[in-house]
Amino acid sequence: MLEWLKQLSKQLASEPGWGGGGGRAPAPRAEHPYQIAAVVLMIEASQADESVLPEERLAIESAIREALDLDGQKLESLLAAASESARAATSLYEFTSVLNRDLGQEQKVLLVKMLWRIAFADGNVDRF
């Protein structure tokens, strides 16, 4: 279903991952910037109601497995990198701009659908 993310991974294979900066310890790195950006948005969708239930965490992990064919340590590393990047960010612009730049219209629609699935994984859509 998220074949587009796998294809994008191949297209962007030459792009470097994100590093840290600003005098802080380097942020964890992902293979590609769009991976961090997509997972940050997944995390934010799950946290919109200010709690992350196990169902939401499982929905995120499932989306990563499906879209990026990652499992085990690579999946956990990507989640850790995205969580750290989300904590260090002052806005979502740095993530949405990467996705806006690198994804086509169809891919953006698929990402939004995936985010709604994550937000509704607990059976409740918060007003935020």
Image (cartoon, rainbow, N blue to C red):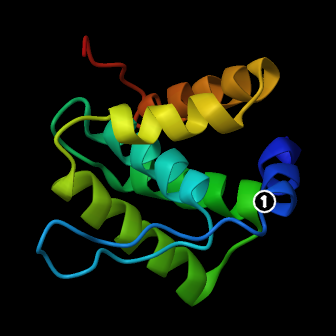
Residue 24 against residue 128 in the figure, above or below: below
Q: What is the quadrant of residue 87 in the picture? A: bottom left
Give the left or right position of residue 43, taking residue 47 as reference: right
Q: Residue at left 66%, top 78%? A: 71
Amino acid bearing label 1: Ser
Q: Position of residue 107 (x, y in %)?
A: 76, 29
Give the left or right position of residue 75, taking residue 81 as reference: right
Q: Position of residue 128 (x, y in %)?
A: 25, 16
Query: Which is nearer the eye, 102 or 37?
Result: 102
- Residue at the farthest front position: 22
Residue 23 against residue 95 in the figure, above or below: below
Residue 65 against residue 44 in the figure, above or below: below
Residue 66 against residue 116 in the figure, above or below: below
Query: Which is nearer the eye, 78 or 95?
Result: 95
Image quarter (top left, top right, bottom left or bottom right) of the N terminus: top right
Can residue 121 be seen here? Answer: no
Q: Position of residue 121 (x, y in %)?
A: 48, 37
Q: To which residue does mark 1 refer? A: 9
Q: Residue at left 60%, top 70%? A: 16
